[in-house]
Amino acid sequence: MAQQRRVQLSTQRPTSTVCVLGTELSLDVRGSAPKDAVAFHVQGTPGVKLYVVHETQSVKLPSSVSRWPLATGTEVLLAMDALSKDVGDEKVGAGGHRQDPALLCTLASTRSFLQVRISYFGEAGGVPVARAMLYLTCVEVSLDADTSRSGAVSRTLLDKATWTWGPDGHGAILLVNCDRDDPKAEMPDNRDTAVLSYTDLKDMSQMVLRTRGPRTIFTGHRLVLHVDFGDADKVGVFYGGNSVALEEYKHVLGGSKLAYAIKPSRHQEESIFYVEGLAFPDVGFSGLVAFHSPNSVPSPFPHPQGFLETPIFTDTVVFRMAPWIMTPNTAAPLEVFVCRWVPGWGGRPHPARCWISPPHPVFLPSVDDNEDFVAAVGAVAEKAKCPLTVCPLLENRQDRWIQDEVEFGYVQAPHKTFPVVFDSPRDRGLKDFPVKSILGPDFGYVARQAPEGASSLDSFGNLEVSPPVTVRGKEYPLGRILIGSSFPRFGGRRMAKAVKDFLVAQQVQAPVELFSDWLHVGHVDEFLSFVPAPDRK
């Protein structure tokens, strides 16, 4: 249903108002009627669509009924399907004084102003006892995003205030801007409030505020864009005005900034905002964020407190934060990471070689260095035409279990896709490697900590994902995440709640817990993996 706004009429002087394209006006025909009026007749100029709602029936005008009773529940609805070329309220004299009706009609006919006239009749019928005149200006005010998921912002009939999943769904998508486009920066881009490069802008989604119609209607008027308080720490919005210069892009919404007022340009009908996501879905955050553009216009009539602004329209756009999607090991590799390791390097045992399991220490046997292993992995990577990244001793600090430190996934929107490394809370020798050596341009970073302390089950060897699967009729086209755990009724080790909650909140790869606590280390990858097969089973 189109947005609807009620308009008060007057038989004492002409009324003027603004109608936003795609909305309806409800005319208060009973409120302005003289006491002795019992019926009314309504007519409009071409370009104005009129409907009379009477006894729950909506009748499009013109109709066979010439006069309608002023009964309770009777109303007139108005809509327009084309923009005005002129401002209709120019026919109201300076200060809002009433001009001669004949002159008004002459002006309207010669300049094609849009208008509606209500004629009121008494019991005797015949000559109208009063008339109400409404002059209209139709404008377009819209807040748009890529709700059709085509990769570009366009006007659409889809409901911008709702969001649905799937290839047939609709709704705009935001990427969490968690990469680091500036190599000199210390933190990911979602932790600053600046645009440092054009590549940074490309990680963001566009949101366009459009204003079309007679430009004088917007003179001296500011449109407002605002974000809900609960969403403000999840998004950042940048605006460069009419400029494309990087230094002109300012942070205008997000954090403590809940609203931004913009004055429409006389020569520019579109204002382009760039929106970045700051946080992934998680406990207490569904991933949905909403932006609103409540718009009003100055009243053409004076008021004791000055010229008041009348709210006319509110547009809302909802974005969903793109979830972190875990990559299955059956997918084609894009890059291979391996740790170089030398036994006893540094002159002290390392947690990777010594596992303390109360009440007795268990020492893993020392092995030779892994030069041959690194070379073999390099040969396979070369054959697959896949780059190899070797984490040296100085960076891994004798922590060879890179599979336990990180997990790879990605985020995707219609306009952009990039990989995101998920950093585990185990934090051993490799704890700085993801930020120092993986985070970079178009390679994002996300982490979750274990405040209660990390266990072996918080290592990401305990995190796998299946190929696409259907379970009890429900399809999981991106597979399901598999987590090693203990039996719920018997206690034991479990994955950190913060990590598990994060995985559940992404919604697209619903996690499944498998019993793995019977193993000393307890990782799901110690007893389960997926490999391609000819029959896909």
Image (cartoon, rainbow, N blue to C red):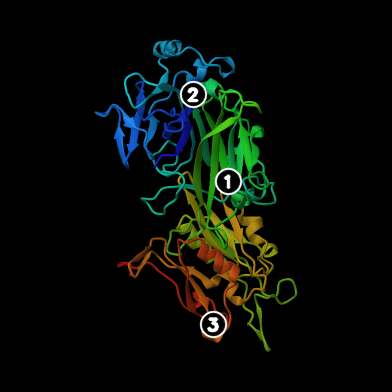
Give the label, 2 or 1, closer to the camera.
2
Q: Looking at the figure, which quarter contains the C terminus?
A: bottom left
Nearer to me, 36 or 24: 36
Inspect the image, locate mark 3, and give the three-letter code of the amino acid beneath it. Answer: Asp
Q: Earlier in the sequence, mark 3 or mark 2?
A: 2
Q: What percent of the width, then of the height, locates residue 479?
A: 42, 64
Q: Are marks 2 and 1 in contact (CB under 8 Å)?
A: no
Q: Which mark is residue 15?
A: 2
Nearer to me, 120 or 231: 120
Q: Looking at the rendering, which quadrant does residue 494 occupy?
A: bottom right
Query: Measured along the vertical axis of the image, is residue 56 above or below residue 396?
Result: above
Inspect the image, locate mark 2, and give the three-letter code of the amino acid beneath it. Answer: Thr
The residue located at (52%, 85%) in the rendering is 489
Mark 1, residue position: 276
Mark 3, residue position: 517
Q: Are marks 3 and 2 in contact (CB under 8 Å)?
A: no
Query: Element under label 3?
Result: loop
Q: Looking at the rendering, which quadrant does residue 308 occupy?
A: top right
Query: Element under label 1?
Result: strand
Q: What percent of the width, then of the height, locates residue 249?
A: 64, 35
Inspect the image, locate mark 1, and give the three-letter code of the amino acid beneath it. Answer: Glu
Q: Residues within 10 Å of mark 3 (few under 14, many from 20)?
A: many
Q: What percent of the width, then of the height, locates residue 274?
A: 57, 40
Q: What percent of the width, then of the height, locates residue 326?
A: 49, 61
Query: Seen from this angle, which residue lies furthest right?
Result: 347
Nearer to me, 118 or 175: 118
Distance of mark 2 from mark 1, alpha carbons?
Answer: 43 Å
Give the label, 3 or 1, closer to the camera.
1
The residue located at (41%, 54%) in the rendering is 165
Give the label, 3 or 2, closer to the camera.
2
Q: Residues within 10 Å of mark 2 (few under 14, many from 20)?
A: many
